[in-house]
């Protein structure tokens, strides 16, 4: 988070990628906290919500690491839509996923976040 603030201070355009891993990163409170953190940062051009997928298992095994996410159930599609909506409510310009897109044309940051 400190690096995100640094990028904001030097006005470096930034895209944020958030991966939904069921049971780890998917609670609504977690999504809301991330959105509220990034909303006041003026350098954030886009927030991408990405769904966890098990394709990385092969890479982990090739590197000799234990892959501990093999029992993770893939997230439901509606989770993405709900998360994108929550993020857009904070005033972030653009938030999207590969299959679902949501955009807010005017950045409106609630006064409590400024």
Image (tube, rainbow, N blue to C red):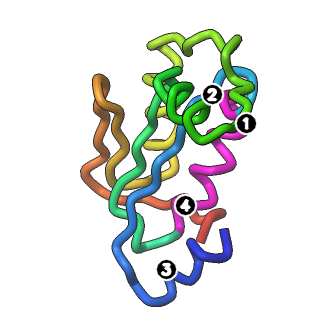
Q: Which residue is mark 3?
A: 7
| Residue drawn 60% across the image and 76% down it | 3
Q: Which residue is mark 2?
A: 21
Circle 4 or circle 3, nearest the eye:
3
Q: Nearer the viewer, residue 23 or 67?
A: 67
Circle 4 or circle 2, nearest the eye:
2
Task: Report the Cα–Cα distance between label 1 and label 3.
Answer: 25 Å
Task: Report the Cα–Cα distance between label 4 and label 2.
Answer: 20 Å
| First in residue order: circle 1 vs circle 4 | 1
Q: Which residue is mark 1?
A: 29
Circle 3 or circle 2, nearest the eye:
2
Is 105 rendered above or below residue 29?
Answer: below
Task: Report the Cα–Cα distance between label 4 and label 3.
Answer: 11 Å
| First in residue order: circle 4 vs circle 3 | 3
Q: Which residues are magenta?
A: 25-40
Res 29 → quadrant:
top right
Magenta stretch: includes residue 90 = no
Considering the numbered disc 4 on the image, is that residue within a helix, a strand or a loop?
helix
| Residue drawn 59% across the image and 72% down it | 114
| First in residue order: circle 3 vs circle 2 | 3
Task: Report the Cα–Cα distance between label 3 and label 2.
Answer: 26 Å
Compared across the picture, whether 104 is left or right of 5 comes to left
Residue 60 location, x and y as percent? Answer: 59, 35
């Amino acid at each position: 988070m400190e690096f995100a603030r640094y990028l904001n201070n030097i006005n470096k355009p930034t895209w944020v990628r958030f991966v939904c891993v069921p049971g780890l990163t998917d609670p609504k409170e977690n999504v809301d906290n991330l959105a509220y953190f990034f909303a006041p940062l003026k350098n954030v051009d886009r927030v991408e919500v990405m769904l966890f997928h098990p394709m990385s298992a092969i890479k982990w095994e090739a590197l000799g690491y234990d892959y501990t996410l093999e029992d993770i159930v893939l997230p439901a599609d509606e989770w993405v839509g709900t998360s994108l909506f929550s993020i857009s409510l904070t005033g972030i310009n653009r938030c999207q996923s590969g299959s679902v897109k949501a955009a807010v044309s005017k950045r409106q940051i609630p006064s409590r976040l400024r």
